[in-house]
Image (spheres, rainbow, N blue to C red):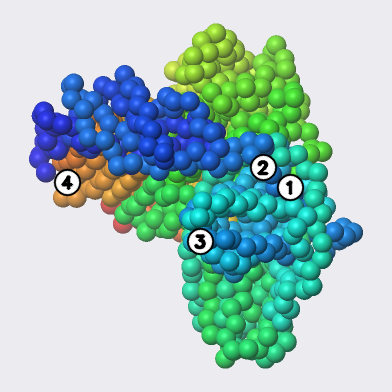
């Protein structure tokens, strides 16, 4: 490392002639559309590319070549004719630097499935017979013969319900709960599998077990079945080329048979019942269903897979004698048992996220039974696990089995298999745990779509949750395809008047769908994807949906531009709201709605500008300005106060530029700081305000208060659940009360990712790794050293490559390491140094750094100092004045700007002089011991 305030960068040697390095890490987005977009990375050799050559070689040997005369690396449009169904070949790329071409990249294999309805000769089939929603899971089978060994075979398959498909007894693929949950009336996903290795010459058999899944199983708290249809059905098309030149197509039709099997009952909420003694039942006929195939689309997201396996701890007995297993973390999936049991023995596995007073805490599951049952054969060691359900749990109760019969206990962890892209660490262990909980919560709730929770009778794609969490999700994992597919469902479900349902897919249907922050997902999520991944295609595709939502609000708000008098969720789950009334927040709902309206209008204007809709950009820019003016007139006083004097109101106003001038902005920032102090740095915001709070404090010049808020461990706070042993983010700040009992509210989830949105601030501000241009082409490195955290590090796999910022304060220095990927630049904005723009490579800086000394001049200063305030509160507690630091802060709030010496008079304003003098003496003793004499 070099030393000084602006030392010369340490970087890799820049390109100096010769052939530039070949591109690598080629990726194709939206291949199922037939018009994929290419992205790639280049070596960190300092070269600025000026052209890209794309070569597509068909399997037959024909090559097509096109040159893009630009240096763009992200989202290059497919330059050739659209790919058709069953296309296969390879793509290579080369780059030109200063007139010299690089070698071609390694080839990226390209293969498309069935892209249109006309490609299907298969038809949906279902067992013949009356509808029985509680019938055992049917097994559909088809035997066939091949005249020669297969050389190529593809199985295209989907279902109404979920399917588990085998060829010759071997599982097809490694996905679970296929085809997942989409807006079935409009979009039904199918997936292609290479099954060449599973076939052979001679007799073969294709089988598929069908489960209720989301299609026919119970959904929503109403626990209604058959929300999409009453009949389970399979659609499969197996296309085979054999070594003798023959081609064969095995499709679902009347030649198939239906059987009963070992699964007696299955439901996502209730679990699965399996009788391992039951073999395949006798064959019965199937019938074709007249299901339109126009809704089919090739898989556009990674499948749900088993992404981890967690070994259960040693079984133990609860106070009531129940046999329990602790898996050490709250997860989503199922329990896998290996047992040696008696013939016909019934074994049940019940699931829960927490223990309450030592027993399985199942009350938060509401109507979800979350129980898997097995009847075993008693023949040696048997493996017990479901296939047609999933559960959210940390603990399992094992019923009907003794510890000595258990051979193995583990949990299969399920999630959409998204590529991890981001990490964070820091010197504070509890913050590291908080971040790990955010990651684990996202993993459990990103199961085919972004759900609110994975355990109770809900598990729905609430729009408000992903709207606030999208930036964090985009950092932690490659969420682009996952969220883009979900946005397509949103657009499909959006009402003609532009209203966005509260949940996507929309199974509520009869609920009027127009709520600020929730419907805003239509605009915010596409913008976040563009901002984080740099591909404007998502804005082009979603633009009609984005515009329709803003126009829906415009029609509701009218010419006054204030959205009022309609249903709103508001600042949902404000900690002050009663458990039974989570929408009863402190912040006025109309204020929240109008602020959100201003925000989405501004984002729509920015989106329109990006995609070249310049007239729209100007029109919605003016609209956003008009809404901001209306907001200021309706909700901001001349002194800079908001009519809802709450942290959420100020956080929105500050983060979304809703204040008309710098003076009122400064006053609002100061007021927010005092409001945060007044509650003793406990969280006083709900769904809308919480993701904004630390940014608002930081931007208002109070980063120390943002850190003080982050590091608070009292309830409610981000770290309170950590102190209670949480391993995921909770729905409520106090889902588990300090005495170990579960919050009495009807909605009490222990795996609810939304409030983990603070992780985005950890990445961007604490570590200092932030996008300053779409796709991280420009990176802002502006960390926040000190304030209780002595070191932090974040890495992110940007579209251009790995970006990393690591810093630590040690021996009077701030030591900063920065890694910038090829094609990107970073601006280093470090304390005590002028901003510095650097290019690709590794950069190291050492700067003199001394944390700002703690001030103990005013009462506010004392409240800000966690250690000092804890010591002062202990005196107030002993005097019977305050139960904890939050109550002490509330007492001190009227005198925050006063000298610290006035604290006694402030907290006991009407006491007799001797009482005040005695209290002052005790408080002064604390101050003296803390390094200050009065």
Classed neighbour count for the residue bearing mark 1: other residues with Cα under 10 Å, few (<14), some (14–19), many (≥20): many
What kind of element bears circle 4? loop
Comes first in the chain, label 2 or label 4: 2
Q: What whole-number distance in Å separates the C-alpha atoms at marks 3 and 1?
A: 27 Å
Classed neighbour count for the residue bearing mark 2: other residues with Cα under 10 Å, few (<14), some (14–19), many (≥20): some
Q: Nearer the viewer, residue 661 or 827?
A: 827
Name the residue that disc number 4 marks. Answer: 812
Name the residue that disc number 2 marks. Answer: 120
Q: What whole-number distance in Å separates the C-alpha atoms at marks 2 and 4?
A: 69 Å
Q: What whole-number distance in Å separates the C-alpha atoms at marks 1 and 2?
A: 8 Å
In the picture, the quarter occupied by the N terminus is top left
Asked if the residue at tag 2 contacts the one at tag 1, i.e. Cβ–Cβ closer than 8 Å, the answer is yes
Comes first in the chain, label 3 or label 2: 2
Comes first in the chain, label 1 or label 4: 1
Asked if the residue at tag 1 contacts the one at tag 3, i.e. Cβ–Cβ closer than 8 Å, the answer is no
Q: Name the mark on residue 123.
A: 1
Q: Name the mark on residue 149.
A: 3
């Amino acid at each position: 490392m070099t030393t000084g305030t602006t030392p010369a960068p340490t970087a890799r040697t820049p390109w100096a002639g010769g052939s530039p390095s070949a591109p690598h890490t080629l990726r194709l987005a939206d291949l199922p559309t037939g018009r994929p977009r290419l992205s790639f990375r280049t070596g960190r050799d300092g070269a600025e590319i000026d052209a890209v050559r794309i070569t597509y070689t068909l399997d037959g040997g024909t090559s097509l070549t096109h040159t893009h005369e630009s240096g763009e690396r992200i989202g290059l449009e497919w330059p050739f004719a659209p790919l058709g169904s069953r296309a296969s070949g390879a793509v290579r790329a080369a780059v030109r630097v200063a007139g010299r071409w690089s070698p071609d990249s390694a080839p990226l294999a390209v293969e498309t499935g069935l892209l249109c309805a006309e490609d299907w000769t298969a038809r949906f089939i279902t067992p013949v017979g009356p509808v029985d929603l509680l019938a055992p899971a049917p097994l559909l089978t088809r035997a066939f013969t091949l005249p020669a060994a297969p050389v190529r075979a593809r199985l295209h398959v989907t279902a109404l319900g979920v399917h588990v498909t085998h060829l010759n007894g071997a599982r097809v693929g490694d996905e679970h709960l296929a085809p997942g949950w989409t807006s079935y009336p409009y979009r039904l996903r199918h997936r292609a599998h290479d099954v060449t290795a599973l076939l052979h010459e001679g007799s073969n058999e294709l089988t598929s077990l069908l489960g209720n899944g989301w299609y026919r199983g119970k959904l929503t708290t109403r626990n209604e079945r058959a929300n999409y249809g009453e009949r389970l059905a399979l659609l499969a098309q197996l296309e085979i080329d054999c070594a003798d030149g023959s081609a064969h197509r095995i499709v679902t039709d009347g030649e198939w048979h239906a059987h009963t099997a070992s699964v007696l009952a299955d439901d996502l909420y209730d679990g699965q019942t399996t009788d391992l003694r039951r073999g395949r039942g006798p064959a019965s006929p199937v019938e074709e269903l007249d299901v339109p195939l126009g809704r089919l689309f090739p898989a556009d997201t990674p499948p749900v897979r088993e992404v981890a396996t967690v070994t259960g701890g040693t079984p133990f007995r609860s106070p009531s004698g129940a046999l329990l297993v602790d898996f050490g973390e709250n997860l989503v999936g199922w329990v896998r048992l290996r047992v040696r049991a008696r013939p016909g023995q019934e074994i049940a596995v019940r699931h829960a996220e927490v223990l309450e007073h030592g027993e399985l805490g199942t009350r938060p599951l509401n109507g979800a039974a979350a129980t898997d049952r097995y009847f075993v054969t008693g023949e040696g060691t048997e493996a017990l696990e479901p296939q047609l359900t999933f559960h959210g749990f940390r603990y399992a109760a094992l019923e009907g089995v003794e510890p000595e019969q258990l051979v193995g206990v583990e949990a299969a962890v399920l999630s959409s298999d998204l590529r991890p892209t981001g990490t964070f660490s820091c010197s504070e262990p509890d913050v590291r745990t908080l971040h790990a909980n955010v990651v684990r919560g996202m993993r459990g709730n990103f199961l085919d779509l972004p759900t609110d929770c994975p355990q109770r009778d809900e598990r729905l794609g609430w729009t408000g949750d992903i709207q606030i969490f999208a930036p964090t999700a985009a950092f932690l994992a490659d969420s682009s395809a996952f969220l883009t597919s979900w946005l397509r469902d949103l657009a499909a479900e959006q009402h003609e008047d532009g209203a966005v349902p509260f949940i996507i897919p929309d199974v509520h249907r009869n609920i009027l769908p127009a709520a600020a922050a929730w419907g805003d997902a239509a605009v915010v999520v596409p913008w976040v994807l563009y901002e984080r991944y740099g591909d404007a295609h998502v804005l082009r595709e979603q633009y009609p949906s984005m515009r329709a939502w803003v126009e829906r609000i415009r029609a509701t708000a009218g010419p006054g531009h204030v959205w009022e008098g309609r249903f709103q969720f508001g600042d949902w789950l404000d900690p002050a709201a009663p458990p039974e009334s989570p929408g009863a927040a402190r912040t006025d709902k109309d204020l929240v709605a109008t602020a959100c309206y201003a925000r989405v209008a501004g984002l729509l204007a920015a989106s329109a500008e990006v995609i070249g809709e310049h007239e729209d950009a100007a029109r919605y820019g003016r609209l956003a300005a008009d809404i901001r003016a209306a907001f200021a007139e309706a909700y901001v006083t001349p002194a800079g106060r908001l009519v809802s004097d709450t942290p959420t109101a100020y956080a929105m106003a500050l983060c979304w530029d809703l204040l008309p001038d710098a003076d009122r902005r400064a006053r609002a920032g100061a007021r927010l700081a005092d409001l945060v102090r007044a509650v003793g740095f406990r969280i006083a915001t709900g769904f809308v305000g919480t993701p904004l709070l630390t940014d608002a404090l930081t931007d208002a010049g109070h980063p120390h208060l943002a850190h003080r808020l982050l590091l608070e461990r009292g309830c409610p706070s981000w770290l309170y659940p950590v102190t209670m042993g949480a391993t995921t983010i909770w729905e409520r700040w106090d889902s588990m009360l300090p005495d170990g009992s579960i919050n009495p509210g009807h909605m009490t989830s222990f795996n609810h990712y939304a409030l983990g949105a603070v992780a985005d601030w950890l990445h961007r501000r604490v570590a200092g790794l932030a996008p300053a241009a779409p796709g991280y082409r420009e990176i802002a490195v502006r960390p926040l050293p000190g304030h209780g955290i002595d070191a932090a590090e974040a890495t992110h796999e940007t579209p251009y490559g790995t970006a990393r910022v690591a810093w630590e304060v040690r021996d009077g220095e701030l030591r900063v390491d920065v890694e910038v990927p090829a094609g990107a630049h970073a601006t280093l904005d470090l304390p005590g140094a002028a901003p510095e723009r650097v290019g690709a490579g590794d950069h190291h800086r050492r700067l003199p750094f001394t944390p700002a000394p703690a001030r103990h001049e005013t009462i506010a200063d004392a409240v800000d100092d966690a250690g000092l305030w804890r010591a002062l509160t202990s005196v107030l507690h002993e005097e019977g004045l305050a139960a904890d630091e939050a109550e002490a802060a509330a007492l001190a709030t009227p005198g925050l700007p006063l000298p610290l010496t006035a604290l006694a008079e402030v907290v006991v304003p009407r006491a007799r002089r001797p009482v005040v003098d005695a209290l002052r003496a005790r408080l002064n003793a604390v101050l003296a011991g803390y390094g200050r004499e009065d």
